[in-house]
Image: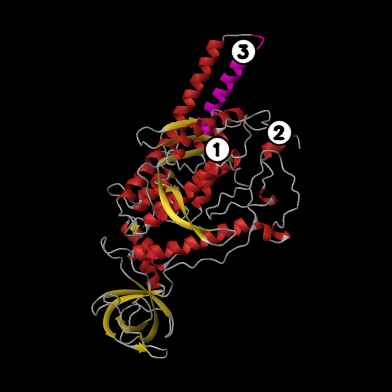
Amino acid sequence: MSLLTTLARLEAVRGGRAEPLATVRHRHLSERPMVLVPLTSAGEDGAPLAVLLGTDRDAPVLHIVPQPLNRTLRSEFLADLAADLLPYLESFGDEVELIEGSEKDPETGAKAPVVRELCADAPQLVVPNTGGVRHLALLGRSTRFRRTAEDEDPGPFPAPARVPLLGRWLTHLAERSAVPGSSLLLPMTGLLARHWATGQSHLEDQHLAALLAWHTPPEGQTGAEAAERAETERNAEGRLVRPPAGPTTDPVFDTKVLAPAIARYDAAATALREAEGPGGGDVTAAREAVRVSVDRLRAVLRAELLPAWHDVWHGLDLLRALPPADHLAERWTGDRWSYTGHRDRLAAGEPPQPRVDDAVTAARKLAQREREQTRLDVQEALDDPLAMAEHRLSGEAFSGVVTEVVPDYDTTGRSPKPRPLVTVRTGDRPHADPGREVHRVRAAPGPEAGPAPAAQKAVIAAVDPEAGTVTVRVLSGMGRKKEPEPGSLPEPGERVTFTLFELTVRQAAPLPDPDDTPWTHGGPPGAVVTVLPAVTGTDTGSDTGSDTGSDTDTDTGTAEDWERSGR
């Protein structure tokens, strides 16, 4: 936790309300997000119990599993979920824009022009907290390898074709959510915690209702009091008024409401089977009893999920009040490329993502996430004075007013080069000695001035702590003429910011192809890996643009697959 965040939390405790950590919104919000509130069975994260989803805050759709231990009912639940979610995910794949570029010919090495499709927009799923993200990842893992009737060996329990397709989409969204700055799958608690500080711990911030209580505490209550009430308040039946949707259930709800409701359904289902059996019975009455028990379950589960549903939409309202950051569109374009790439992999009929990536693909993903984290830190600092203030407090940047600009030249070469000295009066104390390289943060020009200029590099020439000044020697960004171009240097009285970190992200060293790696990392090819039919694959689901794989890219199947195969 940075010093500024710590101070903001202390101020939140003193003031009784959430304190801003940002002046702009650093994550993209879709015009039509899909809000999804999942609920799982107690003690089994991978067993779905219910989900409330939709793009209309006034018309959520509820899907439930009346008996989570019944695999047939769970399969029907997943099929219904796919029927609602897949049309939304696929609806952004038709409208595209054409992007001109070039690529190297693998044989000649010559660059050839190419035109690529980029989807004009992309879907966005919003869940209450990080537990919801993990649950969707588990659903993707458990469904993307399911056999269907279209497979050569469908097995005794084939799933509808849309179920493994949903699993591939959920896996892609979950993997993309691990990329810093991505906005395809977002937890609301993480969004709010990035933009505001509360007076409670990070663990307590995972309770969405308690987190929101710090933003809008009732009259006469502090944020802490409102958060405690949101976490602990119970109704006359002893149930939580605002369940956490963790996505696990409240134990009191499990004991007093859910378990009896499931027991009533089990009894009704058993009676229906007996009525339809050889002994006979009133089948119509038995079916009506099952319908009534399911309706009761739907009513109690909807009541359990609606508070979190409204809280997610409340959080979206708070975030939409913030102006978008300048670099937000650039990061969303990266999400659109990711969505477009996965759309194309599905259209090409490639296999599902493997359970374990090969060494090269894993290294590429790690390098990409490290690179995106660095880029995100830099972009947030450039977009937000509060984010830059953290770097200034840590000595990684300094900001001040220019007091003097002295022309100077480097005469060691064939022709003199401008190397002016810029003196800045600042109250910051950068952790750097003379000779340290720094980079000038240049303000983006207006909409009619073209693209923003490149960052300007300089070195610290002198530091005078008593006078509160730092003198830097500018090395670049002044044009190619003998004299600096107009506007390339700051004027006296102008406020400037210099950072000790680079403002552009360096590209990582190229990685070898999987076939060129040693046997300790999955290559060279030739090793025979025993796998189950119809669950092999080389699609990495990576956003690095590489879909290459080796024999180790295969997945050995889920536990359910092994059980069905008799192994």
Q: Does 565 appear above or below 244? A: above
Q: Depth check: 380 or 504 in front?
A: 504
Amino acid, disc 2? Arg
> How far across and how far down the image is residue 304, in percent?
44, 35
Ranked by sequence position, the earlier of labels 1 and 3 is 1
Secondary structure under tag 1 reads helix
Amino acid, disc 1? Leu
State which quadrant residue 496 falls in.
Answer: bottom left
Residue under numbered circle 2: 564
The alpha-carbon separation of the residues under discs 1 and 3 comes to: 35 Å
The structure's colour scheme is secondary structure
Characterize the magenta stretch by its predominant secondary structure: helix
Q: Nearer the viewer, mark 1 or mark 3?
A: 1
Ranked by sequence position, the earlier of labels 3 and 2 is 3
Q: Are marks 1 and 3 in contact (CB under 8 Å)?
A: no
Query: Which corner quadrant holds the N terminus?
Result: bottom left
> How far across and how far down the image is residue 418, in percent?
34, 84
Residue under numbered circle 3: 276
Q: Nearer the viewer, mark 3 or mark 2?
A: 2
Amino acid, disc 3? Glu
Q: Does 374 appear above or below 267? A: below
Secondary structure under tag 2 reads helix
Classify 10 Å Cα crowding around label 1: few (below 14), some (14-19), many (20 and above): many
> How far across and how far down the image is residue 59, in percent?
37, 32
Q: Does 523 appear above or below 38? A: below
- The magenta-colored residue range is 254-279
> How far across and how far down the image is residue 111, in percent?
51, 60
State which quadrant residue 419 falls in.
Answer: bottom left
Identified at 55% across, 28% down, the residue is 76
Identified at 44% across, 63% down, the residue is 375
Q: Which mark is residue 165?
A: 1
513 drawn magenta:
no
